[in-house]
Image: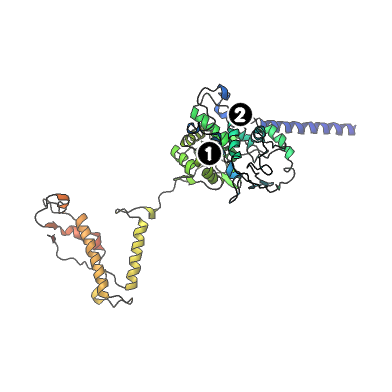
Amino acid sequence: MSGRRLWRGGIVAIIAVAVIVVAGVAWIVGGPGPMDFAGDGKVGLADYRAANPTGVPAQFAQASVVKRGEYLARAADCLVCHTVPGGKEYAGGLGFNLPFGTLYSTNITPDKETGIGNYSDQDFLNAVHRGIRRDGARLYPAMPFASYTYMTDADALAIKAYLFSLAPVRATAPANTLEFPFNQRWGMAFWSALFNPDTRFEPDTARSPQWNRGAYLAEALLHCGECHTPRNLAFALDNAKKFGGAVAAGWRAYNISSDKNTGIGGWSDDELIAYLSTGHAPGRGTAAGPMGEAVDQSLSRLVPEDIHAVVAYLRSVPPTASSDLPATLAPPPRQLPWLERDRRGRHNAVRDAGRRADRQRSRRHQCRPDRDFRNQAPCPGGCDLHACLRRHLLRFRDRIRHQLRHRALRRPGVPDHRAGRGGAEKADGPIVFWPRALHQSSAMRRFRRPLMPPPVARIT
């Protein structure tokens, strides 16, 4: 009896574990798709009556297939992942450091031995849409075929035409150093069956053509979610936290959902457009790391209409709060005081530097205008005391003239002494300045013994 009970208990335990595993897989697989938040208005591309959201912009519609493929390859950011810094373009060999080893990108030049020179159109579509190489081996999701699967066949083949127009480069990528069981490529077949929908982009009739264009760019070509969307236990995108931020290649890919605290909900359209086009938004930040490379090699090459479309799509993504970021971010930094300008339009830094130079020169020569020069000892620096005195007196004279011209109070009824400039009638008689203006002058208050003549100055 005890043996039979033990056997029955084992069967029940196995069934319970199986149920838990199936429920977990169903919960992971049954998550939302990347565009399910938009509603149920999606239709096939052939049934969509508005402007075609796929392909290239209108200005490239009549270009050759190679030119169109070049634009699409730039948008898909193929160059960054398949080029080693300082190496040949698209020759592969770039290493991706993962928690379980290092994965190297492959050669996608038309070389027939080490590249994709022997790929047919169907072979290329299998690799881009399904993650299957020409020899039948499975590709790792580091090649974002789960996002490229939304790319149309025409766009994928245009990219192939561009890649085949390049000069072939013979370069073999280093061997991957993945740990077991991640080094078993056949396991990627189960991963693809669960997490790769293997379907093409379907526009939403309830949304504008600009939104659909932005959705196609962000989800298919730009594959924004591959870096900015967190991943589940199976390393697939968790679209329940879409664009909520994640760690990719050792860099923090920040929250780009519409959340106003930890996302980009507080950014203006102009700030987003500037950041995507140039990699910098004043008061927000500057792109660096993989995002900086994406801006340099991909986003900055897009036409303005496509950048505006991406911004329109990002605005519609539901807000997702990042739990690992502070709920309240610091306000944009104010302008530093030393970068402000004074009343004359000079930077405070320039003004302060001039004052420091004057002080150092005065200390070196021991000749300061606020001292009694009659009792001043000879300058140890070897300069002529009278020359120093004359220089300071001339500087003092210029300051007084400036105060008299711009800050002194003029006697009422006397014509302006500047009226003669520009052909106007000259004023008759002297210009009288009241002593009050002179004594309130900031230039006079800086000296112990004012070198002022009479109480009233007359300039004739």
Q: Is residue 152 visible?
A: no
Query: In the image, residue 69 lies at what x, y percent?
Result: 56, 36
255 sits to left or right of 441: right
Q: Residue at x 22, y 58 (%)?
A: 403
- Mark 2 secondary-structure assignment: loop
**Amino acid at circle 2:** Arg
- Of the 4 image quadrants, the one containing the N terminus is top right
How many angstroms separate mark 2 from mark 1 (CA)?
24 Å
Q: Is residue 24 above or below residue 174?
A: above
353 sits to left or right of 82: left
- Of the 4 image quadrants, the one containing the C terminus is bottom left
- Mark 1 secondary-structure assignment: loop
User: Which numbered marker is on residue 256?
Assistant: 1
Q: Residue at x 50, y 24 (%)?
A: 50
Number of residues whose C-alpha sits closer than 10 Å to that of mark 1, classed few (under 14), some (14–19) or many (20 or more): many
Q: Earlier in the sequence, mark 2 or mark 1?
A: 2
From the viewer's side, name the closer residue of 28 and 50: 50
- Residue ID for mark 2: 200
Q: Is residue 121 above or below residue 426?
A: above
